[in-house]
Amino acid sequence: MSALDVRDLSVGYGKVKVLHGLSLAVPEGAIATVIGPNGAGKTTLLMALMGLIPGRGAVVYGDRDIAADSTEERVGYGLCLVPERRELFSDMPVADNLLLGAFPRIRRGARDVEDDVAAVYQRFPRLQERRTQLAGTLSGGERQMLALGRALMARPKLLMLDEPSLGLAPRIVRDIFQVIADLKSTGVSILLVEQNARAALQVADYGYVLEMGELVLEGPASELAANPRVLESYLGLAHSPE
Amino acid sequence: MSFNIALWLSQDAITNGAIYALLALALVAVYTVTRVIFVPQGDFISLAALSLATLQAGLVPGTVYLLIGGGLLITAIDGVAVLRKKKLKRFAAIALENIALPAVIAGAAVWSASRPEDILLQVAVTLAIVTPMGPMLYRLAFQPVANAPILVLLIIAVAVHYMLTGMALVFFGGEGVRTQLLPDISFQLGVLNITGQSLAVIITSLVLIVLLAILFGSTVYGKALRATALNRTGARLVGISSEFTGRLSFALAALIGAASGILVSPFTTIYYDTGFLISLKGFVGAIIGGMTNYPLAALGSLLVGFLESFSSFWASTFKESIVFTLIIPVLLWRSLTTHRVEEDEEP
């Protein structure tokens, strides 16, 4: 059973084709990762899955094809994207950023939003310390925590993460990946896009390699991590053996 | 100029400045949320004042037909789309909002027209007629092109302004109107003769400004509007739809325009096109606030009120020119002190 099933997805900006007929799946309750070099189309893939840019092909979530639905509708179904640029509300306090993460739920009359805020603070105590501070004044690591926390406020069933380790110190990267592993244990399906292939393949169950807009390799994460081509291109072992 | 004259002029300045401030806040809200420079803001003033005057004359205002027509048009467009997808519940919601609600308001207007002495009812019906026009305009004119460049949105706004002005002329004719809201009470405060009307304007404006501050500062819907203004992509990613925030901001703008029209109509003769000139002065205030800063826009509008009132004493023929010339030094100052923000970095 897949949480998300993408079939023959093609995406382009005007005449420039970026993704050429991708098919991939995120198993229910598991972590799938897409690794690949800069410019392979990883971010474009996530934006198309979220409905931020139009694509051709089928995007099946649960048992319905959501390819024609708007971003806001997809959020309502339980999809959630933590984008590479975080896209926080920089002139608003941390607490308001979290609150707005639950906006569709609040509109539907949810009463337990405060509990979820408390849960996010428990997961990221730093955010609680900074809850009255404007999001724009946070450090890189704190901004990533806030982006993750805001996403969790929507109670996502499928969480998509775009380069969560980008620009962060190694210790914070470890923390973030620990949180990703924790989330999986709560039953959330995760699609993780990363340039940090080593960390991604360690935490993921299944992996895809995206190059020039095409999936060139796929397999269980442990097998991919041992694949000579992946070792050479993405884990850098051929050039600097550990 | 004596001190007494300065006091009189200041009273005038504050009364007008309060109205300009309300309009400026609406303009800032609409611009930051939808990127529309809302030229038709002033038309709500005329439509509200003329509707109120018509009700007071014991007639049903033509704006009711505008409301019903707009509702039918939206039902035809959106209703067919959801019926094709077989979403019956959604269709019922659309029909309720766009056919049933205008019908109820029309009924209230007919009832109100038969009770010329019930001023409170007339005010409520006027607000109820004009406010839904905001979201309707958004749905029909702006939502289909919500991602267009700012210039395209501005040109559409100008077209909508001419359409509304034309509608006002068709429905109400070229005659100017004044409305009767409060009995002509006034009292003496030192040298100032304070009228009930100007006090009502100032108090109502202050109350509305405080309500707006509460809406944007403390409610989740106001925060959603601000979030959309701050980061459009971020807002979509948390499920705040631009359709929702657009309609909400346009409803606010229409409500503020209608309230302003009701407030000014007892002491200003309102013609079908008067509202535009009034809202232009709110525009000057909004520009002082850079179209984005609410407190600065409100203060700027107050400055416009003072400039207008004192220049009408010293150089009454140049009153309007002096007010609008203010834009030039303000734009110079803003372009020298603020960094240009890219229009949008979205794909």
Image (cartoon, rainbow, N blue to C red):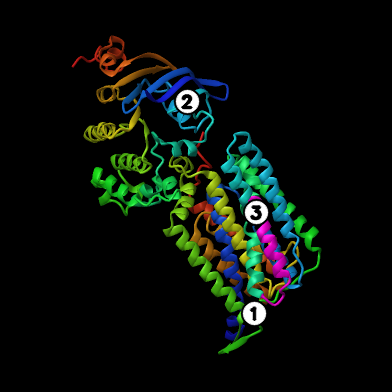
* Discs 1/2, front: 2
Disc number for residue A73: none
Indicate the secondary structure of the residue bearing disc 2: strand
Give, as a three-letter code, the residue at label 2.
Answer: Val
**Residue drawn at 49 percent across, 30 percent down:** A66
For the residues tagged 1 and 2, is the chain the same? no
Which of the two labelled residues, at mark 1 and mark 3, occupies the earlier sequence position? 3
Q: Does the magenta stretch include residue B266?
A: no
* Discs 1/3, front: 3
Residue B335 is left or right of residue B69, and the answer is left
Disc number for residue B182: 1
Q: Does the magenta stretch include residue B103?
A: yes
- Predominant secondary structure, magenta span: helix
The span shown in magenta is B98-118
Residue assigned mark 2: A59
For label 2, the crowd category at 10 Å Cα-Cα, with few meaning under 14, some 14 to 19 and many 20 or more, is: many
For label 3, the crowd category at 10 Å Cα-Cα, with few meaning under 14, some 14 to 19 and many 20 or more, is: some
For the residues tagged 2 and 3, is the chain the same? no
| Residue B319: percent from left, percent from top | 68, 69
Residue assigned mark 3: B100
**Residue drawn at 67 percent across, 65 percent down:** B108
